[in-house]
Image (cartoon, helix red, strand yellow):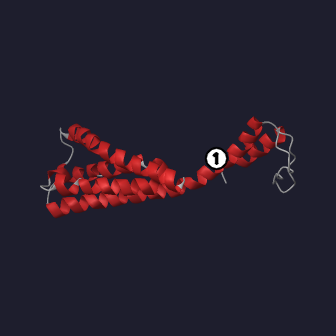
Amino acid sequence: MQPGVEGFCKAALRRAGVRCVAGGRCPPPPPGHHYGNARLRSEAFGAHRKLWDSTEMPIRSMRMLAVLVSALTYWEIVSHVTGAAEPWDASAYWRLWYPAPLALSALAGFWLRRHAGMAGAILTFAQLPIMQPNTGFTGLWPLSVAMLTLLALPAIALSALAGRIATHHLGA
C-alpha cells in the first residue's frame, strides 16, 4: 500500500464528518446521504485513485521493459542478418527493416494504451545501443541521434494513435 494514502483518505473523510471504525475501514454512506461537500469527497476518493495508479505502475513498467527488450533484439537481428554496422546502412532498410518497427510500434501502442507514444520512441531509439558497439562514439554521434529523432516521429504518431484507439474502444 502506498504510504500516506490511507491516512489521507481517513483525514479527508473525518473532515467530511465521517467516523471510521476501529479496524480502519470507513463505512459507506447511508442511502440518500453523502460525505460532506464535493471537494472533500473528491479528496477522499482521489486518494484511492492514486493508490490504484500506484499498483498499475509495475505492470506498465514491465510492458515498457518488454517493448525495449523486443526492440533491442529486433535491431540486433537486423544488424546481424544484414552484416551492417548500423541498421540503417542495410540495403533493405527502407523497404523492410524500418516499416516493420512502424507496424510493431502500432501494436505496442495498442498494448500500452495510455503511454503508447513511448513505444514508437523505444522501438526507434533501440538502434542506438546496437550501433554503439559496432561503430563506437564518433563525431557523427549527434547526427545519429538527430536522424533517429526524425525516424521516431512516424513511429510515435502510429503508436499514440493505436493507444488512443485502444483506450477509447476498449477502455483504459
Q: Is residue 19 left or right of residue 46?
A: right
Q: Residue furthest left?
A: 91
Count of numbered marks:
1
Q: Is residue 65 visible?
A: yes
Q: Is residue 22 left or right of residue 128?
A: right
Tell me where residue 166 appears, x and y as whole percent: 47, 54
Q: Residue at x 34, y 60 (%)?
A: 70
Front one among 134 and 45 = 45
Tell me where residue 76 appears, x and y as whole percent: 25, 60
Q: Is residue 65 left or right of residue 89?
A: right
Q: Residue at x 36, y 59 (%)?
A: 69
* Quadrant occupied by the N terminus: bottom right
Q: Secondary structure at mark 1?
A: helix
Amino acid marked by disc 1: Lys
Front one among 62 and 135 = 62
Front one among 145 and 160 = 160
Q: Residue at x 49, y 49 (%)?
A: 114
Q: Is residue 118 visible?
A: no
Tell me where residue 13 appears, x and y as whole percent: 80, 43
Quarter of the image for residue 10 reads top right
Q: Residue at x 41, y 51 (%)?
A: 162
Quarter of the image for residue 90 reads bottom left
Tell me where residue 111 appears, x and y as whole percent: 44, 57
Graded by Cα atoms within 10 Å as few (under 14), some (14 to 19) or many (20 or more), the crowding at tag 1 reads few
The residue beneath circle 1 is 50
